[in-house]
Amino acid sequence: MNINKLTSGLDGSARSRNEPVAADKAPAAKVQQSAVATDQVKLSNSSKSMQQIEAEIRDLPEVDDAAVERIRGAIERGEYKIDYEKLAGKMLDFEDRLN
């Protein structure tokens, strides 16, 4: 099927199906090479902070199951005391590290 008979293009010329298309590969290669040379990625400060925090989390030790059970038991018995000032301080420290 020759669609060029239906749409003759902007210049009004039509090509048959068997007519070779002249393609100059060099300019496309130059454009592609120059695009590779100018591509850059810049991370925001929050992204850098998140990457740092993720790296620190990976370095943390595995979960201490014995400590978790000890705290869980203390909470169930009503013996676990929360230091709200210390908790608030840790939350603020965490927020500062994100910014």
Image (cartoon, helix red, strand yellow):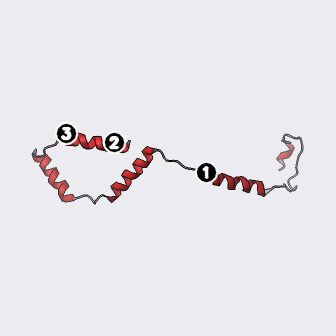
**C-alpha distance separating marks 1 and 2:** 32 Å
What is the quadrant of the C terminus in the image? top left
**C-alpha distance separating marks 1 and 3:** 48 Å
What amino acid is at disc 3?
A: Glu
- The numbered mark, 1 or 3, whose residue comes first in the sequence reads 1
- The numbered mark, 1 or 2, whose residue comes first in the sequence reads 1
Structural crowding at the residue carrying mark 1, measured as other residues with C-alpha within 10 Å and reported as few (<14), some (14–19) or many (≥20): few
Q: Is residue 40 left or right of residue 75?
A: right
Q: Which residue is mark 1?
A: 39
Q: Which residue is mark 2?
A: 96
Can you tell which mark lies on residue 85? 3
Where is residue 88 shown, x and y percent of the image? Answer: 24, 39
Q: Is 39 placed above or below 7 here?
A: below
Where is residue 26 shown, x and y percent of the image? Answer: 77, 57
**Quarter of the view holding residue 62:** bottom left
Q: Residue at x 13, y 44 (%)?
A: 81
**C-alpha distance separating marks 2 and 3:** 16 Å
Where is residue 74 shown, x and y percent of the image? Answer: 12, 49
Q: Pointers 1 and 2 in contact (CB under 8 A)?
A: no
Q: Residue at x 38, y 55 (%)?
A: 55
Q: Nearer the viewer, residue 53 or 5?
A: 53
What amino acid is at disc 2?
A: Asp
Q: Is residue 87 left or right of residue 47?
A: left
